[in-house]
Image (cartoon, rainbow, N blue to C red):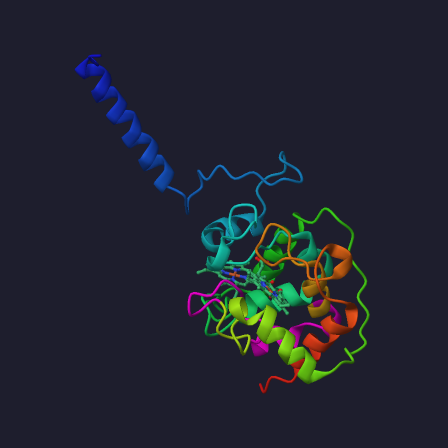
Amino acid sequence: MRVPPIALALGAALTLIVVLAGCRVLPDSTVTYRPRATPTAPPSFGQTLYVERCVLCHGARGEGQGKVGPSLSSQELLTTATDDFLHAAIARGRVGTTMSAWEENGMTPAQIDSLVQYIRRWQTQPQVVLDSKPAVGDKARGQALFTQLCASCHGPDGLTGGKANLEGTAIGHPEFLATVSDAFIAYAIADGRSGTTMIPYARERGGTLDAQQIADIVVYMRSWPR
Ligand code: HEC
Ligand code: HEC
């Protein structure tokens, strides 16, 4: 079958336009991202900042981009993270990973708060009340479990994840460990982070670990010298 040259030329031009349009992701005011909660609301300050500085790694809806940036919209994160945790994560970043300390890049506390508020708009489920009791468990058992189940993604020390082309984030990072409770860590292990490769490990969620084993892992993670 013969295709007329004009059709070929048109096809090529269209492809080029589509490719070029696809490349123009950010940052400018024509980004077509719409907030989910109230589509008619004017774009907030936090949204503008997010589109300019965060979308590239965390995705337009906070869905994350695999090892490039974790999900910021999983309900497991949002329902257990405090605003302070999110604020600290943005302000101080995770030195040694690609997550910058935005405070040092000139972002004001008010701007960071507006980002936290923006991220909160992805939360559809009520906040979970976590207890503040420290985990009680066996460090050696926790280490064995960690080596067996977690090190492949997070690195044997919880730090090489994200680097070394591993899948998981730097859960051994001092900035992370200093800003979360034991219960927050245990919840992340038990319930995982939906939409990511971090699966739920709790038996009642289809995983293989009981509450004591999860506590053992938390105790081991807390023993990392920082
Ligand atoms: C160059 C990529 C990149 C950019 C840009 C970026 N991040 Fe991140 N972000 C990451 C990575 C990677 C991590 C995980 C670091 C680790 O612990 O391994 C992260 C972690 C986080 C966390 C902590 C999540 C958790 O579960 O611990 C928050 C919150 C966050 N980023 C928010 C933001 C915001 C808001 C912006 C925009 C101001 C932003 N990030 C820009 C890559 C990026
Ligand atoms: C297949 C790879 C993989 C395995 C195995 C894995 N994780 Fe993860 N884990 C991830 C990824 C990826 C994330 C970030 C998910 C996201 O985008 O929110 C994560 C997130 C976490 C978080 C939350 C960190 C934060 O900043 O909020 C904790 C805690 C955690 N993992 C602990 C563990 C433990 C403990 C194990 C072993 C029982 C484990 N993980 C096994 C990939 C993995």
Q: Is residue 91 left or right of residue 218?
A: left
Instruction: Work out which quarter of the rendered image holds the N terminus and state it.
Output: top left
Residue 133, position in %: x, y?
81, 76
163 falls in the magenta region = yes
- The answer to whether 188 is drawn above or below residue 48 in the figure is below
Residue 49, position in %: x, y?
51, 53
Q: Residue sitting at 77 percent across and 77 percent down?
A: 135
Q: How many marks overall? A: 0
Q: Nearer the viewer, residue 168 or 37?
A: 168
Instruction: Work out which quarter of the rendered image holds the C terminus and state it.
Output: bottom right
Q: Residue sitting at 74 percent across and 74 percent down?
A: 215
Q: Residue sitting at 46 percent across and 69 percent down?
A: 97
Q: Is residue 189 visible?
A: yes
Dominant SS type (magenta): loop
- The answer to whether 153 is drawn above or below residue 126 in the figure is below
Q: Is residue 142 left or right of residue 161?
A: right
Q: Nearer the viewer, residue 107 or 207?
A: 207
| Magenta residues (range) | 162-184
Q: Quadrant of residue 179?
A: bottom right
Q: Is residue 93 visible?
A: no
Q: Quadrant of residue 181?
A: bottom right
Residue 210, position in %: x, y?
77, 67
Residue 90, position in %: x, y?
56, 65
Q: Residue furthest left?
A: 5
- The answer to whether 20 is drawn above or below residue 206 in the figure is above
Q: Residue furthest bottom?
A: 225
